[in-house]
Amino acid sequence: MSVVADFLGCQLPFDESLLPQKCYLVGGIVRDVLLGRKRKPLDIDFVVPHDAIKIAKTIARKYRAGFVVLDPTHIIARVVFPEATVDFAQQEGDSLFADLGRRDYTINAIAFDCQEGKLIDFFGGQEDLQKGIIRMVNSQNLQDDPLRLLRAYRLACQLNFTIDSDTRYCIRKFAPLLAQVAMERVNQELDYLWGEKQGSHWLREAFEDGLLAICFPSVTAEKVDLLEKVDESAQFITEKFGKNFGKDYSWYKDAKLACLVSNELTKAEEEMWRLKSSRQEVKTVLTILRYTSDLFAEDFRQSKRKQYFFFQSVQDNFPVLAVFALAYSIDFYKGNQEDIESFRQLIVYLMDHYLNPEDIIAHPRPILTGNEIMKHLKLSPSPLIGEMLTEAQIAYIEGIVRDKPEAIQWLQEYLKRRNN
């Protein structure tokens, strides 16, 4: 293999002869190769002294790959292949040392010389990789782009590293600067934390260092405490019903979001939109906050009517709501193990209903249509028809009627009672 391919352990998606004489691999790809971490698809960053956009455009044209200018000010362009994303950035400053010296953490400030086939490490990044430490290159770099403050926790989480004490001191000091960063960028960093095994631990660390309150104005220590309980709840549900859920930690992200936003629906919605959450995320989180309390009603377990309306309201948000509710039950029942176990069994019971596509409570099929009601009872279209459809369906769920003829007869009696 050629020099770069030999370092990466795989071929580049283009001929290396298209690279200029002075060209360096930088950033996360170098770090991950040194750590033995595999990336799929490949995400490759090159730094070149000149003509970054021209080089990227030439390669994109030759291979009919995607091309986009990411940053015309800093001269960064991207070439998109099916198996890899390749960024070309123009060197910042008058030397590679100056360019690497502007990066966030030492482990991301190591370069690989694509011609000489050697590592260039001015700031001790390789030693920090060996020790498992996230260390800033300098404090000014954190201030220049405050998103880097939050990135330290994401990197520590993904790599199972610790954050250097001096670096952490500076993060605490500069934490208010995170408010200056566009929330889309903040949300992207948080997305990594939702999906990692140690994400809840590092979200707690970010809270203690003053960063999480910038993202979630209503956050408290009690809310943060729920995060690891959510992980435990998700593990229980995954083990119990594993074939139906994702293998990573991102499928219950919205349950964690529900932990951190305000308990008041209006405020929670405002916080979600401010964070630039998707419409679906906002809908799911608000559903969790609005309907979780239904599960704690005294008669919910015995009332098929309440269970029917509950499933109609939450629909496919139920698994994530169940994760949140299980975590919340620990505090709700003040650690009473008997009550917690009883609630857990309720969730199992409801999950069994939800996962059965033929279940008449979670996935009801109408026993009657509106036209059938109007025809047999000689009624005209009105809101009453919808009411009767619902009541007939609940009578069927409760076992009061077994088929259409019984449902029609029951509705005749229902009308009499209603009109008296």
Image: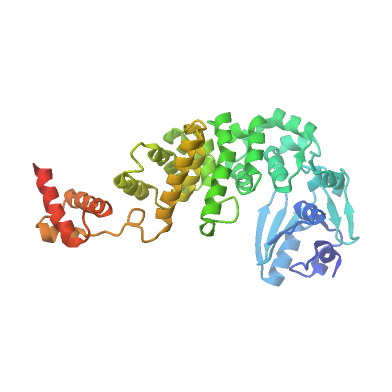
Q: Estimate the x, y position of residue 188 in percent, counting from the top left.
A: 61, 47
Residue 345 location, quadrant: top left
Quarter containing the N terminus? bottom right
**How far from the left and from the top, in percent, is residue 138?**
80, 36
- Left or right relative to 416: residue 277: right
Image location of residue 348, percent across then percent down: 45, 49
Q: Nearer the viewer, residue 109 or 35?
A: 35
Q: Quadrant of the C terminus?
A: top left
Q: Is 353 left or right of 13, judged from the image as shown?
A: left
Q: Residue at x 72, y 45 (%)?
A: 155
Viewer can see residue 95: no
Q: Is residue 205 visible?
A: yes
Q: Horizontally, is 112 left or right of 222 in the view?
A: right
Q: Residue at x 81, y 39 (%)?
A: 137
In this view, which residue lies farthest toward the top? 173
From the viewer's side, name the closer residue of 4 and 205: 205
- Front residue of 413/140: it is 413
Give the residue at x 29% y 46%: 305
Residue 387 rendering spot, x and y as whole percentages: 21, 49
